[in-house]
Structures are given as C-alpha cells and as structure tokens.
Amino acid sequence: MLLFWDAVSAHFLRSLRLAPGTRLLDVGSGPGTLVRLAASAGIDAHGVEPFWPDLEPRIKRGYAENLPFADANFDVTTCFSVIEYLADPERALREVARVLREGGRAVFAVPDLAAYPGLRRERYRHVTSPRWFGDMVARVPELRVSSVRGFGVRYLVPLAKRTFVPLAPRVGPRALAAIYARAFPMAIADMSVWTLAR
C-alpha cells in the first residue's frame, strides 16, 4: 500500500501545478514522498512529521498544531489525509494560516470517513466528512474556501487491496493509483480536496 500512496502523492502533487521556486510545506509528511517529489521538480519543499522514524533533512519533527516555522513562511501548504488523526484540527488550521504568506493557499485532502458505516472508527480521532471540515474552516477567519473537489473513488481502495493488489503485487498498486488518483463527483468521492486562500 505504500507504493499505492506514493503514486497517489505524485498525482496529487502534479494536480497542484506549482511553479519551480514555490515554497511548500507538507504537513504530516510521513516518509516524505511528496517533499522528495516536489524538491526534484525544483520546488522549495519542506515538511513536518511527528512520528515517522527516519526523517530526511527537509522534514522537521513536529506537530500540525504547533508548526516549527516562522509566520508567513510558505506560499503553499498541503495536508493529505492527516487531519482525521490530529488532536486539535482547528488549531492546526490556524497554524497553517499563520505560516502561509498573504495570498498563499492551503490544500487539504480530507477523507469522507462518515461515508463508511462499517469503518473501525476507533482508529481515528475524528470521523471526517466534507461538512465537518467546511464547518471548521468557517471558524478560521484567516482562511477562505477557493474550491472543493472530489478525489478518489469510495470503497475502491479497501476492495482492491484485498483482491487485485495481492494478485499483482508489483503492478497492482500503480494500476490502482491510476484509477483512484483522479477527480470524481463528490457523490462517489473517497476524499474532498479543499483549496483555502490566505
């Protein structure tokens, strides 16, 4: 599944259409895939990650609720399927607003966990949904919604990782990502991707 999420991260990064030299912060960087891909494209990419054991130099140890960066430091921030795990997601939104330059944008990919009734919900601090996230953004006056789009197909990943991917472990993850990592109507989308302006 790490191969799958690496391929999804690559598509997500391409969809941002960032110019070389853009200063990017990836919040919740994990193994640093998005940061590495962005840096190889000439983007001034940095990350913050609290738990992944080995961090590369462009990624600092830290939490989304207390970002270890100065005010007005980034042109773009990303946060891909992380907010459902945060202790205080509203505080994280305020921190993202703080580190963004005026005119910058924050891009959040928020899974629609409320659409999965059989989900083991104890794995997450928050059962996220587009409505849940939109209500929270409305309480952070420094940020305004520029756009919301659907991403991924609901139920595709849990079904495919139990069937297709085990049958084709080298090809399966990339093929699955090629299907999943696209814009889809919100009615069937697995995530909502929010672009917020500072």
Image: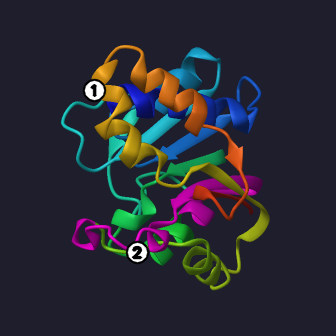
Q: Nearer the viewer, residue 3 or 104?
A: 3
What are the residue bounds of the magenta stretch? 96-123
What's the distance in space between the residues labelled 1 and 2, CA to CA? 28 Å
Q: In which quarter of the image is residue 98?
A: bottom right
Closer to the camera: disc 1 or disc 2?
Answer: 1
The correct choice, above or below, for 153 with respect to 41 in the image is below
The first of marks 1 and 2 along the sequence is: 2
Q: Nearer the viewer, residue 87 or 119?
A: 119
The residue nearer to you, when weighing 153 against 39, is: 153
Is 71 part of what is drawn in magenta? no
Q: In percent of the image, x 57 and y 49: which residue is there? A: 153
At mark 2, the secondary structure is loop
Q: Residue 188 carries which label?
A: none
Question: Could you tell me if residue 65 is visible in this image?
Answer: no
| Image quarter of residue 83 | bottom left
Please state if 191 lies on the left or on the right of 91 as rendered: right
What residue sits 56% from the left and 15% below the top?
Answer: 40
**Percent position (x, y) of residue 85?**
34, 64
Q: Residues within 10 Å of mark 2 (few under 14, many from 20)?
A: some
- The coloring applied to the image is rainbow
The residue where tag 2 is placed is 127
For residue 181, side relative to residue 5 (left or right): right
Neighbour tally class for label 1: few under 14, some 14-19, many 20 plus, Cα within 10 Å: few
* Residue assigned mark 1: 166
Q: Which amino acid does label 1 sit on?
A: Pro
Q: Position of residue 48 (x, y in %)?
A: 40, 45
Q: What residue type is disc 2 on?
A: Val
Identity of the residue drawn at 54% across and 72% down: 129
Residue 145 lies in quadrant: bottom right
Question: Residue, x 33% and y 70% (percent of image)?
Answer: 118
Asked if residue 121 lies in the magenta stretch, the reply is yes
